[in-house]
Amino acid sequence: MSNNDAIADLVLRQEVPIAVKVVLLVVLLCATILFAFDERWGDSIRHLAAIPFQRFNWQSEQFLGNPVIRITSLLLSSLTIAAFIFAYNLGEHYNYENSSFIDFIKILVVVLLFSTVKFGFNYSYFRLHKSSGVGSQLTDFHFSINQILSLVLGTLLLVDVFYNRLHGNFFYFLVGIGSLFFLIRLYGTILLLQNNFRYPILTLFVYLCTVEIVPTLIVAKILFVNS
């Protein structure tokens, strides 16, 4: 079998709806286009992801508040999460047998709205506490972690869809990867706020529960427990 025949076999296998495969290829194309806008993407993500763990932030300051990085992260992470939900038929009322592009668009809109509302809440919260600089650092840290997770999750999702045909236990491995990234993000958030957010520990605890922990638990219940 030639290389072209092997690729065609992977793409055209019928065990996975063609809509799922096309969605993943569209996500891959969008990621390629988005990264083309910033030649220093790798350096910026590496420095921003290390913000909570740096003793001095002068290396990351040049990348803070970059609108291209933020928009890229928002779009890429939303596309990847929506593709993950779409591919594995997650959610209580979602019908896998009728998978269509309209379903994916609906999921994408919900994910984008959730991400945008969370970003707006973060911005307002730290502005209200007169800590816009800390809020900017935290936002860029979150966006960088989200981009790294999107790349890892998207790559593994491509493998599972086109090679494993969504068979086996690869899904649980991806959930484990996502959980690990969430813990890293949560630890980095705590570290950054402890060192820079000059408010009582109770304020920090309320923020973490309201913005990070509780929304994650609610989303996990909707996607996994009710699936």
Image (tube, rainbow, N blue to C red):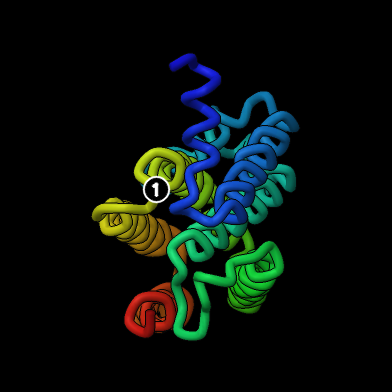
109 lies left or right of 181: right
According to the picture, the residue beneath numbered tag 1 turns out to be 165
Give percent across and percent down for residue 69. 66, 43
| Quadrant holding the N terminus | top left
Is 103 drawn above or below residue 218 in the view shown?
A: above
**Toward the viewer: 82 or 1?**
1
Name the amino acid, label 1.
Arg
Say if 72 sits above or below 208 in the image: above
Compared to residue 45, the image places residue 27 above or below, namely: below
Residue 53's spot in the image, x, y percent? 36, 44
On-image quarter of the C terminus: bottom left
Tell me the residue at 24%/55% (across/down).
169
Q: Residue at x 68, y 72 (%)?
A: 106
Q: Is residue 84 left or right of residue 183?
A: right
Total labels drawn: 1
Residue 20 drawn above or below residue 111: above
Residue 113 as seen in the image, left or right of residue 209: right
Q: Residue at x 64, y 74 (%)?
A: 110
In this rendering, would 164 be left or right of 72? left
Residue at the spot x=61%, y=39% of the render? 28
Query: Extreme front residue here?
Result: 1
Q: How many other residues sit within 10 Å of disc 1, few (<14), some (14-19) or many (≥20)?
A: some
Q: Position of residue 144 (x, y in %)?
A: 52, 46
Find numbered disc 1 in the image and state the secondary structure of the residue it sits on.
loop
